[in-house]
Image (cartoon, rainbow, N blue to C red):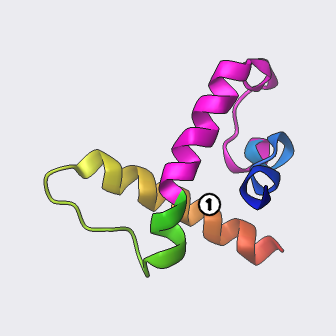
């Protein structure tokens, strides 16, 4: 429940600047939620993004989201 509240549509629009038309589509919104849920354990429990040599895309994605995560924490 906490995770769902945290990644509400209002906050998602701030984190990822996507036009409202796309966010209104439920499939896209659910897809973003799933991606963020998979990223969360890496953000909370790891000091930095995990260093995966064979998979640079996952490192790239986690590092970007962790930057946004830090910004939202600073705002609060």
* 45 up-or-down from 53: above or below: below
* Quarter placement of the N terminus: bottom right
Q: Residue at x 42, y 50 (%)?
A: 61
> 46 or 56, which is in the foreground?
46
Q: Position of residue 26 (x, y in %)?
A: 73, 21
Direction bottom: furthest residue = 47
Q: Quadrant of residue 3?
A: bottom right
Q: Which residues are magenta?
A: 13-39
Q: Could you say where residue 47 lies in the image, as x and y percent from the top left?
A: 43, 82
Image point 62% across, 60% down: which residue?
A: 68
Location of the C terminus (image quadrant)? bottom right
| Residue 37 in picture, x, y percent from top left | 57, 51
The secondary element bearing badge 1 is classed as helix
The crowding category of the residue bearing disc 1, from other C-alpha atoms within 10 Å (few below 14, some 14 to 19, many at least 20), is: some
Of residues 38 and 75, which is closer to you in this image? 38
Q: Image check: 23 left or right of 76?
A: left
Residue at the extreme front: 1
Q: Would you say residue 54 sits in the magenta stretch?
A: no
From the viewer's side, name the closer residue of 32 and 14.
32
Is residue 59 toward the left or the right of residue 8 in the image?
left
Give me the residue at 80% from left, 21% from top.
Answer: 24
Q: How far across and down, in percent of the image, does residue 75 sit? A: 80, 72
Name the residue that disc number 1 marks.
68
């Amino acid at each position: 429940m906490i995770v769902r509240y945290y990644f509400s549509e209002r906050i998602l629009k701030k984190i990822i600047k996507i036009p409202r038309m796309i966010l209104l589509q439920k499939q896209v919104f659910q897809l973003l939620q799933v991606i963020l849920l998979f990223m969360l354990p890496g953000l909370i429990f790891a000091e930095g993004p995990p260093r995966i040599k064979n998979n640079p895309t996952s490192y790239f994605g986690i590092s970007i989201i962790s930057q946004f995560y830090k910004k939202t924490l600073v705002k609060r």
